[in-house]
Amino acid sequence: MKRFISIAGILLVLFAVSYAFAAATYTPITDVSRITDIQGIYETSATQKFPLGTRIVVDERTFRYSKAGGNLVRNLGGQNYSQWPINAAVLATSAIGATTVTVAETTCAVNYYQDGWIVFFTSPMQWRRIVSNTVSNGTSCVLTLDGALEAAVTKDTTFATGYPSIYADVRQAVSPAGYNTVVCIPLVTVASGSYFWGQTWGPCYAVADGTVPGSAIDKRDLYWAQSGNVEPHGDANAGVGGQVAGYVIPRTASGSGDQFFMLQLSP
């Protein structure tokens, strides 16, 4: 049953959310009850309620606010489909101490890059989080950074590579297989384009791909299969380049494994 909150409480939460969108604060949200009254961890939304990447902790589990780039199956690893849309020299000079930069971008919407990252190949190299961005004017957009530049970036000279939030385009069983990284697990079925809380840490359950985890001695660590299911060390690419998923939690026995595991993506 959803908790009752007062009108004043709702206004307080909406203010906090609107502030987060504007200022892009990335500190963990501890007042989970108010957040989950707006959108619970087992709910999806066709409209965005929080900034992408917003982090909440529910009991022993950590979640990140995410957007589905395709239809998502519950309890299957969700992969980051984004690449690096910004990959060119900056289009305007920004001096030392500046917190905004102009980059080549022909199509982005406002705050498409919020919660994303950018690197400037200056001396020294500079790595910054992207707080917000303006809508593209057809040629460029302006990014606001989380920290001032230590070295100037120069128009048509300084090369930059920028990435959207890793939770901005979550998909499953992406083709070609083997070139994507799992960033969260949806606990419910999610329609393409919807927003959801993707689990990134803590006790979780998944489907086994092949050998059931823990059914062989000393096979406690788990890896992501290309399908988004989990597999124990020794199966397919597990342990030889495959991505670590976590470890089996319950006591198991020879020939009797289980898929209840400790998810280890982002605490």
Image: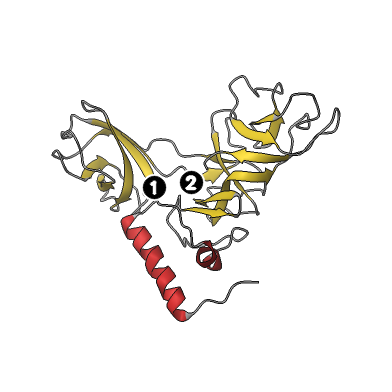
In the rendered view, tell whether residue 37 sits above or below residue 213. Answer: below
Determine whether the residue tagged by mark 2 lies in a helix, strand or loop: loop
Task: Please state which amino acid type lies under the numbered disc 2.
Answer: Tyr
Where residue 48 appears, as percent x and y from the top left, is: 47, 60
Are there few (<14), some (14-19), or many (20+) residues within 10 Å of tag 1? many
Quarter of the picture containing the N terminus is: bottom right
- Is residue 60 toward the left or the right of residue 137 in the image? right
- Is residue 190 toward the left or the right of residue 235 in the image? left
Instruction: Say which residue label 1 marks.
Output: 115
Task: Please state which amino acid type lies under the numbered disc 1.
Answer: Asp
Where residue 180 appears, as percent x and y from the top left, is: 54, 33
- Is residue 231 toward the left or the right of residue 54 in the image? right
Where residue 235 appears, as percent x and y from the top left, is: 71, 23
Q: Considering only order in the chain, which callout, 2 or 1, is on the residue closer to the N terminus? A: 1
Give the spatial CA distance, label 1 vs label 2: 9 Å
Residue, x 66% and y 43% (percent of image)? Answer: 76
Mark carried by residue 168: none
Residue, x 61% and y 72% (percent of image)? Answer: 2
Total count of labels? 2
- State the residue in front, 37 or 252: 252
- Is residue 157 toward the left or the right of residue 120 in the image? left
Residue, x 39% and y 51% (percent of image)? Answer: 26
Instruction: Say which residue label 2 marks.
Output: 167
Q: Quadrant of residue 90?
A: top left
Where residue 185 appears, as percent x and y from the top left, is: 61, 45
Residue, x 45% and y 49% (percent of image)? Answer: 53
Tell whether label 2 touches label 1 (CB within 8 Å).
yes
